[in-house]
Image (cartoon, grey):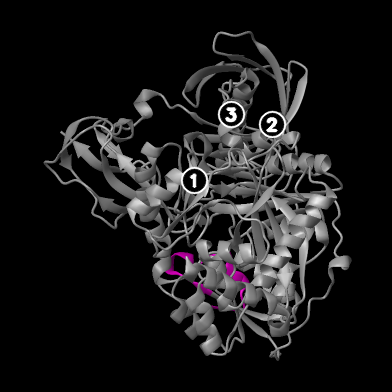
Amino acid sequence: MLHKMQTMASWSRRFATTCSNASQKVVHRQINKLLIANRGEIACRVMRTANRLGIRTVAVFSDADEKSLHVKLANEAYNIGPAASQQSYLRGDKILAVAKKAGCQAIHPGYGFLSENVEFAELCQQEQVTFIGPPASAIRDMGIKSTSKHIMSAAGVPIINGYHGEDQSDEKLMQEAKKIGFPLMIKAVRGGGGKGMRIAETEADFMPMLQSARTESEKAFGDSAMLLERYVRSPRHVEVQVFADHYGNAVYLYERDCSVQRRHQKIIEEAPAPGLSEELRKQLGEAAVRAAKAVNYVGAGTVEFILDKEDLSFHFMEMNTRLQVEHPITEMITGTDLVEWQIKVAAGERLPVTQEDIVKRGHAFEARIYAEDPAGGFLPGAGPLDYLSTPETSNTTRVETGVRQGDEVSIHYDPMIAKLVVWGENRASSLQLLIEQLTNYQIAGLQTNINFLIDLARHEHFQAADVHTGFIEQHTATLFPKKVIPATKVVQMALAHTLNERVQSGASLGAKTCGPFDVEYGFRPNYRVPRSIKIKIGAMEHIVTIETDNDGSYSVRVDDGEWMKVTVRRKPYANRFLLETNIEGHVSCFNAVISGENISLFDENGMIGGEIVQPRFLVTESSMGGVDASSVTAPMPGVLDKLFVKPGDTVKAGTPVAVLIAMKMEHVLKAAKDGVVKAIPNAEGSNVRKGATLISFE
């Protein structure tokens, strides 16, 4: 206890002497060549600002990223190793060697990877390469959550009740858990992104959740130390963007609400946070500035708070000592470029504004577009982006991405495809624009969360800003309704398939048309003969019968329903097969993407996918085979990290049998029923595809 009091006293003295430290000599350094120690959209984002400032950029890439967009956009690029991030993007020594070789004065770490790595920041300082981020001491203090909470308490920033001690024995943690009460949050003292985080609802849950959190934290951060906190049910997650320079100046750029999350990771953010009074907004901002000054912070940082939904009291959660994923919405409401500020402040310049100069205007949303299966527990996915069409960018719409059509979402990295950022004069107009632009973000060939984001943005409670961190769990029934596909969509799918076939047939006979985007459909075999097409959408199969009438229209029937009068025409639009149908007087427009037997329709409700079911005599025997029911299969592409069984072992239902690592997250796979292990086709460390058999049983 005495040691703890002495330590807190030292932090108090540090906080009191912040201003005197600010008077120390600042080194000014010109930055004309910058290495970005990251990949994907954040690397592309930093390059855009650097190019505008006339700064040359250097990219680094793994074997898997050789043809990536960030490599193409850079002035130079260097390979730094295999696909695994531990052998490439997390190798600070390799990255620093490239920076020295290329003659870079500075390194921008982006977010993730080495952005909050104390040792890397210190190594840059030793090698006299400017690290565009805070001092290593600030990263260290804020990176260990238990330490950061003591510092915040000394600086007068409210903290939540919990245990942040050094004794990490099971007995001590259980003892402290009982003092705090259940439910409680178990969190890794290092890192973020939801890794090493579990909720223990009851005392019986505590030890299993503790062990699971420790294992995941050790893999992600190399540290299994945990802290415990009182779990606030239905809280809001509100974070404040701060910025500081070397001269003791610090400002806040208002707050963001990041409450709506899945797997403890943000999925949609907005700025400013809705429903806050200007007084509360100021209190949050000033508390965040105190937090930054308490650790002599420099550069861009984010102070995260838990806001009680009932009484609007707030408590410090953690500080992210880097640029945040969601920083664009802050830029949209304040008219700033935070990356430009980062570069200039790192070069020794003063903040370009004071707090009084920063004015918020309008409202902004950011939606994170992921390759994942929302209905399947948001399991991440991977694979090629066969078709990709994005909204047009403008002053009110930004698309932050690191991929193009034909690129692949890799199993080795985060499955985020893009960030869609929109701005409006108020929350309602901004939200409406978000919905519209989500429908214009069209991806085929890879499952995404876009449909879910549209449903989320249209949800009545989200529209009313009634948000909290348990939003998705609370509204599961309405966010994941059992959707009935209307007959008109089945008709549109059949017509898109038919017209595409006719275009291809016309091209093969030497007609002038040669693709699905052509307007004329000249070749019409068996003009009046009815045609039946079997279409499968989800688990449902439909028979669509089509007749071509004398006037060029169609008579169409779905299953045994009524005949419908239909006309269809193509509307020229860039790279989209945009069709307009009139079905019994109802005119609507949609984009159709056809790849083999797969058809994707895009309209105001998002994407509907289906497939043309071939007659049985066209289906090969191999394609009819299914996965052995007595097996454990990979629910997503990933790396088979660990096996707990071997051939001949007897297992019970629910027994953990393997661990799959996908998108930097650990997934424990269990036996579905009692059995004896027959075979294990893949070894530990193997890359496996989705659906691959990992363990088969007798």
Give, as a three-letter code, the residue at label 2. Answer: His
Most foreground residue, 652 or 102: 652
Residue farthest toward the left in the current orientation of the protein? 648
Q: Position of residue 680 (x, y in %)?
A: 20, 46
Answer few, some or many: residues within 10 Å of disc 3's Cα (few below 14, many 20 plus, some between 14 and 19): some
Observer-side mark, 1 or 3, equals: 1
Indicate the secondary structure of the residue bearing disc 1.
helix
Answer few, some or many: residues within 10 Å of disc 2's Cα (few below 14, many 20 plus, some between 14 and 19): some
The answer to whether one can see residue 514 in this image is no
Give, as a three-letter code, the residue at label 1. Answer: Ile
Query: Label 1 to label 3, Cα distance in Å?
Result: 65 Å
* Residue topped by disc 3: 498
Taking the magenta stretch, the answer to whether it contains residue 63 is yes
The answer to whether one can see residue 65 in this image is yes
* Residue topped by disc 2: 459
Taking the magenta stretch, the answer to whether it contains residue 262 is no
Q: Earlier in the sequence, mark 1 or mark 3?
A: 1
Pointer 1 with pointer 3, Cβ within 8 A: no
Most foreground residue, 307 or 86: 307
Give, as a three-letter code, the residue at label 3. Answer: Thr
* Residue topped by disc 1: 180
- Give the magenta part as a residue range: 60-77
Tell me if residue 520 comes above or below residue 276 in the rendering.
Answer: above
Pointer 3 with pointer 2, Cβ within 8 A: no
Q: Position of residue 154 (x, y in %)?
A: 63, 66
- Residue drawn at (62%, 71%) of the image: 73
